[in-house]
Amino acid sequence: MNVSCPTCSQKVEWSSRSEFRPFCSKRCQMIDLGDWAEEQHTIAGKPAIDPNEMSDDELAAFIKTFDKQ
């Protein structure tokens, strides 16, 4: 089965031999990763946690959870 590379639309064989599937190359894979890092891609929907709707105590507890990691 062939699929289109999400970055450049080149046809890619969907098999274990295609190291970067669904991308055609490492370059296209890294371009996509960069797009996610720069928030050019997003997942639709409301965020599970909206810091603007949290009380100061809730926000402090949330931040403290991540400081422990």
Image (cartoon, rainbow, N blue to C red):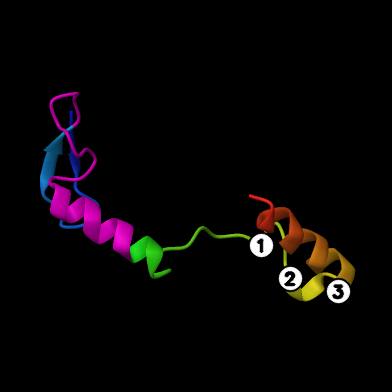
Q: Residue at x 12, y 47 (%)?
A: 25
- Image marks 3 and 2: residues in contact by CB distance under 8 Å: no
Label 3 or label 2, whichever comes before in sequence order: 2
Residue occupied by mark 3: 56
Q: Amino acid at mark 1?
A: Lys
Write down the quadrant of residue 48 in the picture: bottom right
Q: Residue at x 14, y 32 (%)?
A: 18
In the rendered image, residue 31, in percent from the top left (x then y), is placed at 23, 60
Say above or below: 28 vs 4: below
Q: Give the Cα distance between marks 3 and 2.
A: 9 Å
In the rendered image, residue 67, in percent from the top left (x then y), is placed at 67, 58
Q: Give the Cα distance between marks 3 and 1.
A: 21 Å
For marks 1 and 2, give the one nearer the viewer: 2
Residue occupied by mark 1: 46
Front residue (pair 56, 16) = 56
In the rendered image, residue 39, in percent from the top left (x then y), is placed at 43, 68
Q: Give the Cα distance between marks 1 and 2.
A: 12 Å
In the rendered image, residue 5 lying in the magenta stretch gets the answer no
In the rendered image, residue 55, in percent from the top left (x then y), is placed at 87, 72
Specify the label residue 51 is tagged with.
2
Q: Residue at x 55, y 60 (%)?
A: 44
